[in-house]
Amino acid sequence: MKTMQKMKFNVKAQSEGVTVKAQAGKHEVVLDESAQMGGKDLGPNPLQNILVSLASCENVTGHIVAREMKFDLQGLSFNVTGEFDPRGFMGDPEVCPYFETVTVEATVTTSESEERIKELKEKVEARCPVYTMLKGANVEMIDNWTKA
């Protein structure tokens, strides 16, 4: 395998209360909390953003892997759910302060067989940076990839 240069990503963020406006390249991203948490509800909260990032990363990885596999990928859609116990966030040292479980329901639009879908899923799970980061943090990952 040829040597590739490491990539660096950078965001610059400014806060206004619990609202964060971040510059990611030429894009502005706004993360916030609900009024109940002291925010203005101007964008998703950080945990929702992780789930969006996971769906996006699996999508990108899926398209790259499908091309390599010569897999007929016509579309991917995701329903991603994260479960966490807020007691950790609130200061209980006995409780994990991040997702304990993340469930990914992926729907694959394709003419391919269930066996090929399973192969695509396994390759995506092995290579997706966000997925592997969550898995590395011992988040229980529950994955169901089904044909549309």
Image (spheres, rainbow, N blue to C red):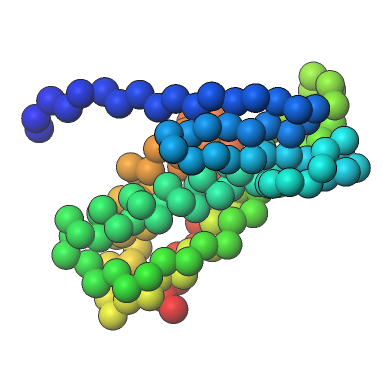
Residue 102: percent from left, percent from top:
60, 48
In the image, 91 versus 100, the foreground residue is 91
The number of discs equals 0
Dividing the picture into quadrants, the one containing residue 93 is top right
In the image, 6 versus 79, the foreground residue is 6
**Residue at x 25%, y 60% (from the top left corner):** 66
**Residue at x 76%, y 28% (from the top left corner):** 16
**Residue at x 24%, y 72% (from the top left corner):** 72
Work out which quarter of the rendered image holds the C terminus and state it: bottom left
In the image, 20 versus 118, the foreground residue is 20
The answer to whether residue 50 of the structure is visible from this angle is yes
Residue 137: percent from left, percent from top:
54, 30
Work out which quarter of the rendered image holds the N terminus and state it: top left
As drawn, is 147 to the left or to the right of 95?
left
Q: Is residue 14 above or below residue 37?
A: above
Residue 24: percent from left, percent from top:
48, 34
Dividing the picture into quadrants, the one containing residue 36 is top right
**Residue at x 82%, y 42% (from the top left corner):** 40
Check the image and name the residue furthest to the front: 26
Check the image and name the residue furthest to the right: 36
In the image, 34 versus 116, the foreground residue is 34
The answer to whether residue 114 of the structure is visible from this angle is no
As drawn, is 94 to the left or to the right of 110?
right
